Amino acid sequence: MNQKIGVFDSGLGGLSILKELRKLLPNEDYLFYEDSIHNPYGEKTEEELLEITSNIVDYLLKEQCKIIVIACNTATTICMKKLRKKYPNTIFVGTVPAIKVAHDNHFKKTIILSTPNTMKSKRVDELIHNYQDTDQELINISGENLASLIEQDKEKEIDELLDRLLKDYKEEADSIILGCTHYPLIKDQIQKAVPKAVLIDSSDGVSREVKRQLEMHQLLNNKEKKGILKIINTKEESLIKRSMEILEKE
């Protein structure tokens, strides 16, 4: 059996990571675990989230996944250290808000928009401490229930929430970090709310790290034909069609 790249998130968000992975590593086989029944992760307790993610890891390992991509900022910031300790022989690649990217590009006023749990996490505090220069302002904002609204495709409510959260920064922010993998799916709406800001997400960096890890562990798939994708949705099978449509959009 060919080993796969396992990718999981609390629903649609991980598709933004999966899309970049398939561009960079098109010959790999993928298993995308779309955990819609537990959406949103950003409102779960640490204990709940560790139990949920451990069950997913158990499943992905049974399905012969050679590497597991946590395509969720919340699950990464809350659970990845514990998962690495619990599964010491498993390769994990996580997703964190791209604060270093904003730092390296010398943006002066950056909004970090993420789920409530990610916003409050120790990992985000560490990243802000490590990458905030004296001449750079990092504004840490909760996206509240934005991921849930994206999951439900509630366009009007999304616009209203973005306007409320971001209106004070509309003229001043020069960049906004999309600190939840759901958020790149509504880039146009976010850009409308903060038109002068450059939008930054983690998908490119995560994809390159997956490739680096596979190369380092000599696990790259050398077959020449395009890889196979399988999607599992924990809530209802009909949602898989929506995910495929999102993946096929340019």
Image (cartoon, rainbow, N blue to C red):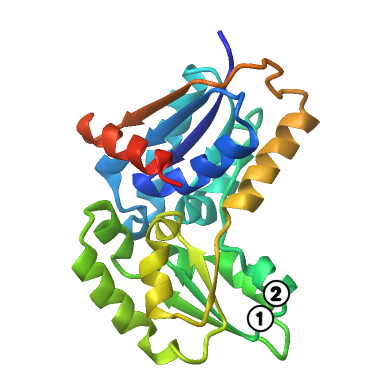
Q: Is residue 202 visible?
A: yes
Tell me if label 1 and label 2 are in contact, CB under 8 Å.
yes
Residue 77 lies, in percent from the top left, at 53, 56
The residue positioned 46% from the left and 71% from the top of the image is: 113
Which amino acid lies under the numbered mark 2 shown in the image of this protein? His
What is the spatial separation of the Cα atoms under label 1 and label 2, in whole angstroms? 6 Å
Does residue 46 sit above or below 243 in this rendering? below
Toward which corner of the image does residue 64 lie, by quadrant? top right
Toward which corner of the image does residue 223 lie, by quadrant? top right
Q: Which residue corresponds to mark 2?
A: 103
The residue positioned 41% from the left and 38% from the top of the image is: 248
Which amino acid lies under the numbered mark 1 shown in the image of this protein? Phe
Labels in figure, total: 2
Q: Residues within 10 Å of mark 2 (few under 14, many from 20)?
A: some
Residue 126 lies, in percent from the top left, at 64, 69
Callout 2: helix, strand or loop?
A: helix
The residue positioned 51% from the left and 27% from the top of the image is: 30
Q: Is residue 142 visible?
A: no
Is 75 or 166 nearer to us in this picture? 166
Callout 1: helix, strand or loop?
A: loop
Residue 39 lies, in percent from the top left, at 29, 49
The residue positioned 77% from the left and 30% from the top of the image is: 215
Q: Which residue corresponds to mark 1?
A: 107
Name the side, left or right, on which 93 lies relative to 153: right
Q: Nearer the viewer, mark 1 or mark 2?
A: 1
Q: Residues within 10 Å of mark 1 (few under 14, many from 20)?
A: some
| Quarter in which the N terminus is drawn | top right
